[in-house]
Amino acid sequence: MAENQMEPEAAEVESRSALEEWRATLCADLATVEKEQQAREDRERSIAGASAALAALETLAAQAQLLPKQAEFFRVRDEWAAVDVALPEEYKAKAAGFLAVCEDKLAREQAAAEAAGPALEALAGELETLAALEDIEPFRKQRQDWEKRRDAALAAAVAGDERVAAATARIRPLWKSLNARLSRHYQELDLARWESYTLKLDLVRELEAMSGAADSELAAVARRLREIRQQWRDLGAVPHEKHHELGPRYYALTTGLQHRVTGYYKDLRSSQSAAEKIKQSLCEAVEAVADSTEWNATAEKIKAWQAEWKPAGNAGRHMDPVLYARFRTACDRFFNARSAHWQARREQVGAALAGKTELCVAAEALGSLPREEAVARARELRSRFQAMPRGGKAEAGVNNRFNAAMDVFFGGLRAADTAARDRYQELIRALTPETPFDPAAAEARLREVRAAWAELPPLRREDRNWESRFRSAGAALEKRIESVRGRRMEAQSDLFPEAMRFVVACVAAARRGEPVPEVTIDLTAFSKLGAAVTDLVAEGGKLPDGMDRALVRNTREFKALLDEWDQQQAAGSAAAPRDLAAELTMAIAGNFAAADFGAEKPRRTPAEIRRKLLTVGVIEPEEADGLLARAEALLNSIR
């Protein structure tokens, strides 16, 4: 009975032992499974991290600039280096390539950033050296290169680089100043081109006039054509928009004239060749009888040959003098021998009388010549007349005739000079300021006198001092006009704020329905303000029709003028633009004062803004205080 009870207990113990063993095996298997699962998850995370790092490297390698993202690059590089999972060789090669690209780019950008400061400092030094030069041409030629150097250095610089900031601060004003000088240089070049255009236009017009020259004038045309071509080359370029206007006309005219000249000289050479043959035969004929003693018969022959000489034509610039000298020598040999038969005195007297008579005729015709040419011709005639021998019994008559002709000629010159000097004095006296002095009338008189002066004939050399006296008188009158106007403008500027406030108060009272205050201020200097008060009084203290619109319009114009002033002040201390077109017009008024240079209208000066401001009219009462405060600042700054 006891043995039977022990058997079930042993079986139960054995069953429990097997169960525990199974349970332990199961737990070990579960731990192994969990460890393998954790290892797979760790590997997947490592692969994902490696893929993200590789993608980030690829993105960084494609960046235009890597230096601003170098911290991100270092982090991604460290992340890639920390990857502890086996990766395909393809991934490793791509990562190595991206790393090499990034490291090379980063090294180059760091080197460029380190060099940016010295490069900008060197550029600033070069600009300082150039700014000290009077010639702006080197800057014009190298400006684009310097811009590229500056932009490249600034693009490579790192934010906060003190050397870069300091060099940039040096470069900025230098660059602005040089650009301003270059702009003025281009303006001056443009004006020079306009001057060349005007002078070339005169040459084209002269060529057009020459195109109608007769064939007999073509020799002079050829000489003048050479001079015009040289002048055309010397004048240089014209404005681009005028090039196609003058060029085709010039080339067409010169080509046409050259064709005529070429044909003329071709025909001339042919006629000269024929004339040379005729004149050579005439020379041979005269030389054959030059020693003949048959005076009358031979003289008639030689005279006949002499009559044939001139109609034979010109044998050319080189041959004609030679042939003429040969012909004349042969003729002179004969006639000199014949002249030995005559009394030397009779021959001398006759020749002298004939020569002096010819000079008398020439002296009597001096009045038909231009002044300068006539004076030179008169001196030549007098010299020749005095050098001639006496003309016998007729000497007194021919002397009186010659002297009378000279007296008439020089007397006329003196009378013309006296009349011209009287006119010079009259015009200069007209520029003397009158009392009381009226600037407007004086300015009108100045314009009239200058116009009258411009119509006078050209001054003689000994009368050039009248020109300087006239200019001095004109300049003094202009200065007097500006002085009087300036004083009036100062007085008007002092009274303007008070006058505007009074009229604004009248408008405000009328809007409130109150009586218009009594006029206690002189508004004669401000026609629009006085007219506004007069209208208010005429309407019994009510706003006239249209005054509201006028107030808005005047306020807008007032603001615009003040804004224009503020913009000019904000632009810095740059000098006001020169009216180069007006300066050029004054400089070359003698050649082409009427030419249209097409210059842009310069911006208004502070004085012009002030003058415009004082004539605007009454403004809105609600905005008057602020606007008048700005206006007073403007007026005070222009004193």
Image: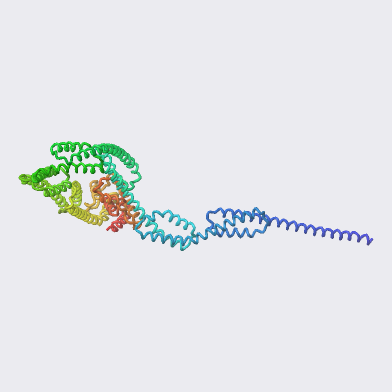
Q: Is residue 361 above or below residue 170?
A: above
Is residue 16 shown left or right of residue 32? right
Asked where in the image residue 264 lies, by quadrant, the reply is: top left
Q: How many marks?
A: 0
Asked where in the image residue 488 lies, by quadrant, the reply is: bottom left
Nearest the camera: 597 or 236?
236
Nearest the camera: 5 or 411?
411
Q: Residue furthest bottom?
A: 162
Nearest the camera: 553 or 543?
553
Quadrant of the image containing the C terminus: bottom left
Is residue 240 shown left or right of residue 591? right
Q: Is residue 453 above or below residue 38?
A: above
Nearest the camera: 180 or 327?
327
* Res 360 seen here: no
Residue 289 position in % (x across, y down): 18, 39
At x 65% / y 53%, what residue is drawn?
Answer: 90
Q: Is residue 87 above or below residue 310?
A: below
Is residue 53 shown left or right of residue 362? right
Q: Residue furthest left?
A: 393
Residue 178 position in % (x across, y down): 37, 56
* Res 497 seen here: yes
At x 23% / y 43%, what residue is drawn?
Answer: 321
Residue 161 position in % (x across, y down): 48, 62
Asked where in the image residue 473 lies, by quadrant, the reply is: bottom left
Quadrant of the image containing the N terminus: bottom right
Q: Which colouring convention does the figure follow?
A: rainbow
